[in-house]
Amino acid sequence: MEAVVAVMVLATVLLAYFGLSQTTVRSVGQSRNYLLATVAAQNAIEEIRAHRFGTPLIEKNLTFEPTMILDGRAAKTAFHVRVEPDREAGGNGSLMGDDLKDFDVLKVAVTWEETEPSGVGTREQSLDFQLVVRRPYEL
Amino acid sequence: MSSKKTSNKGVSLVEVLTASAIVLLIIVVITAAMRVGQSTQRQTDGLAGLSGEMLTVSKMLRDDLKSTALTSIVVYDTVPSVSMASVGDTEKTNRFAAGNWKTHIFYVLKESERNKSRGTSRLIRWVDPEARSSLYPLPSKVIPWNISEKGRKKVVARNVLSKGWVVSGKSGDFQLRSERGAPGGFVPQFIRRGSDGEREYSIHNPGKFSDRDEFGWSSGNTSLVSVQLHLVETGARTMNSLELELKVQPRN
């Protein structure tokens, strides 16, 4: 009886320890992804700044695919950037040539896939922000 | 009178074997748990180290490239390096509110004698001490790898992949090896539009060309500068690496 109780206590402690380790590994992965998503977002902002106002924006140029190796294990996550006019906030699509106005309000979403916190399956994560752009002055 | 009761009962072989098996099982499970814990710690340490270095490099590079002018940037690939005009940290504009171009900044990937066989180099940022103020953001004639003794020098990153080295292998068994012609972990380039409309990367500055002379910036090129960064940390048992692209739009 004592042996069974002892083994059960030990098993519980070890299960909790393994669970904690797995949670930490997933948290490391999630914080890594958020960090890289901010780099993807900065790159997207630079792409939009450099974009010629009033011409179509090619979204494949915004895709960001860094490669990370941690403790000998490779992790490659693709970050996709979606840029569209934020019509609720006054966006009109003039950046991409849909309108002739001199400003636009954009909704930028950086999305990527990562493992669910439970460890089963994947989920889509997203980092969203709003960007206001204007047509450059013609000197 | 007191009588002492002693037990003659011993421990059977089965009990000894069972106890040994349980102890062995416990040791195996605890060792596995310790390994998982150590691996987690290594991953956390690796992420902290790489992300810290990456954030430092990306902030400095972005700040310098954003405040320079596209036409002043010169990229070299013989020794991975870049030079650019700078308005410095103070008095960024002159009395006419135009850029007060005071100096030049250089980034160069420098392999130290100690790290020659390890495949990592240091990324050094230095400021030209002999530059003169100019009304225009002119390119520097100084070669970035001839680092001036008087120049303000700062090591921005210590673990950048050296030129002529690559990370190869598969998951669980990555290693650094030398490969002739490999560009290394610091590759600044201009993003240009090729004749077929697709993007292409080049070390030639598109800002220096006009419509008449050559297909260049004014023919629809982007004004973006791309910097491919590859940071590598190698330990006795671990290897951490981060490879990414930074894009920055300098002033025009």
Image: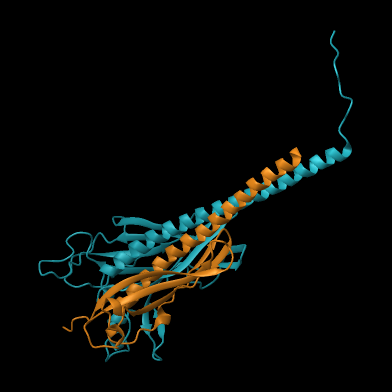
Chain colours: A orange, B cyan
View extreme (left): residue: B95
Horizontal arrangement in the rendering, residue B172 relative to residue A60 (left or right): right
Q: Position of residue B100 (x, y in %)?
A: 17, 66
- Quadrant in which the N terminus of chain B appears: top right
Query: Can residue B146 be seen at all in this image of the molecule?
Result: no
Q: Position of residue A60 (x, y in %)?
A: 43, 81
Q: Position of residue A55 (x, y in %)?
A: 31, 87
- Quadrant in which the C terminus of chain B appears: bottom left
Q: Is residue B54 above or below residue B4?
A: below
Quarter assignment of residue B132: bottom left
How many numbered callouts? 0
Residue located 86% across and 13% down the image: B3
Q: Position of residue A53 (x, y in %)?
A: 27, 83
Q: Is residue A20 above or below residue B69?
A: above
User: Residue A19 versus residue B220: which sits nearer the camera?
Assistant: A19
Residue located 42% across and 58% down the image: B53
Query: Can residue A117 be seen at all in this image of the molecule?
Result: yes
Quarter assignment of residue B58: bottom left
Q: Is residue A92 above or below residue B229?
A: below
User: Residue A3 versus residue B168: which sits nearer the camera?
Assistant: A3
Residue located 74% across and 43% down the image: A4
User: Residue B149 versus residue A99: which sits nearer the camera?
Assistant: A99
Horizontal arrangement in the rendering, residue A135 relative to residue B153 (left or right): left
Residue located 31% across and 74% down the image: B249
